[in-house]
Image (cartoon, rainbow, N blue to C red):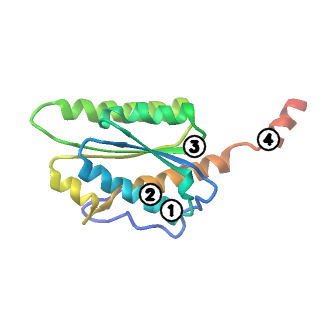
């Protein structure tokens, strides 16, 4: 996470290899200047970690609110190991901001737990456009990079912790 004190978007040398991983990226079409930069960061980080171009599938949805359903489509209809959601909600004059932010956060959380699939949250929730720019490749890094690193780490953790088939077979015999 980028903060005013640190830029955490630099590729960590301890990041697991993504060479054998496949990712779906769902990106919001709303605020395209920002979401396009987030997408560039996520793809750049996946590629730098060894993920092959053909193992990165990008799909667009109309807005940030639709990200959870787009991610669910990846979980249900594809063979990806993890999903990265990218969006940007900028505070306006109405409470719409609150509802969209709450909806996408709850939707992504619910999807992760129900599908048992890592879904990395790369959604900016900012007070103004400048804050979004600063977090989409600006002075505070790129949330797309950070979301890709989180996705790689979570897929690696799932692989590490999942029982292997031979262990499952032994339990059935006993």
State the residue position of label 3. 80
Mark earlier in primary sequence (1, 3): 1
Q: From what the image shows, is residue 61 above or below residue 153?
A: above
State the residue position of label 1. 47
Q: Is residue 148 left or right of residue 172?
A: left
Quarter assignment of residue 27 = top left
* Marks 1 and 3, how far apart at CA: 16 Å
Q: Which is more foreground, mark 2 or mark 4?
A: 2
- Residue that appears at 47% across and 57% down: 149
Q: Quadrant of the N terminus?
A: bottom left
SS type, badge 2: helix
- Disc 4 crowd, CA 10 A, few/some/many (<14, 14-19, 20+): few
Residue 104 location (% of width, % of height): 34, 34
* Marks 4 and 1, how far apart at CA: 29 Å
State the residue position of label 2. 43
* Marks 1 and 2, how far apart at CA: 6 Å
* Marks 3 and 4, how far apart at CA: 19 Å
- Residue that appears at 16% across and 41% down: 91
Q: Are marks 4 and 1 in contact (CB under 8 Å)?
A: no
The circle drawn on residue 165 is: 4
- Disc 1 crowd, CA 10 A, few/some/many (<14, 14-19, 20+): some
Residue 19 location (% of width, % of height): 61, 60
Q: Would residue 174 be visible to someone looking at this image? A: no
Q: Would residue 105 be visible to someone looking at this image? A: yes
Q: Is residue 22 left or right of residue 28?
A: right
Quarter assignment of residue 88 = top left
Residue 7 location (% of width, % of height): 32, 65
Q: Are marks 1 and 2 in contact (CB under 8 Å)?
A: yes
Q: Residue furthest bottom?
A: 13
* Marks 2 and 3, how far apart at CA: 15 Å
Q: Are marks 2 and 4 in contact (CB under 8 Å)?
A: no
């Amino acid at each position: 996470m980028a903060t005013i004190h640190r830029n955490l978007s630099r590729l960590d040398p301890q990041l697991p290899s993504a060479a054998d991983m496949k990712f779906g990226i769902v990106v919001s079409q709303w605020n395209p200047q920002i979401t396009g930069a987030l997408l560039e960061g996520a793809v750049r980080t996946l590629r730098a970690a060894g993920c092959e171009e053909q193992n990165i599938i990008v799909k667009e949805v109309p807005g940030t609110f639709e990200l959870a359903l787009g991610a669910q489509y990846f979980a249900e209809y594809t063979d990806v190991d993890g999903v990265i959601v990218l969006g940007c909600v900028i505070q306006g004059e109405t409470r719409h901001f609150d509802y969209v932010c709450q909806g996408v956060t709850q939707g992504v959380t619910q999807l992760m737990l129900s599908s048992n699939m890592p879904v990395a949250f790369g959604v900016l929730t900012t007070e103004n456009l400048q804050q979004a720019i600063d977090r989409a490749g600006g002075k505070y890094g790129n949330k797309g990079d950070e979301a890709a690193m989180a996705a790689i780490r979570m897929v690696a953790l799932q692989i590490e912790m999942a029982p292997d088939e031979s262990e499952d077979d032994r339990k059935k015999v006993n």
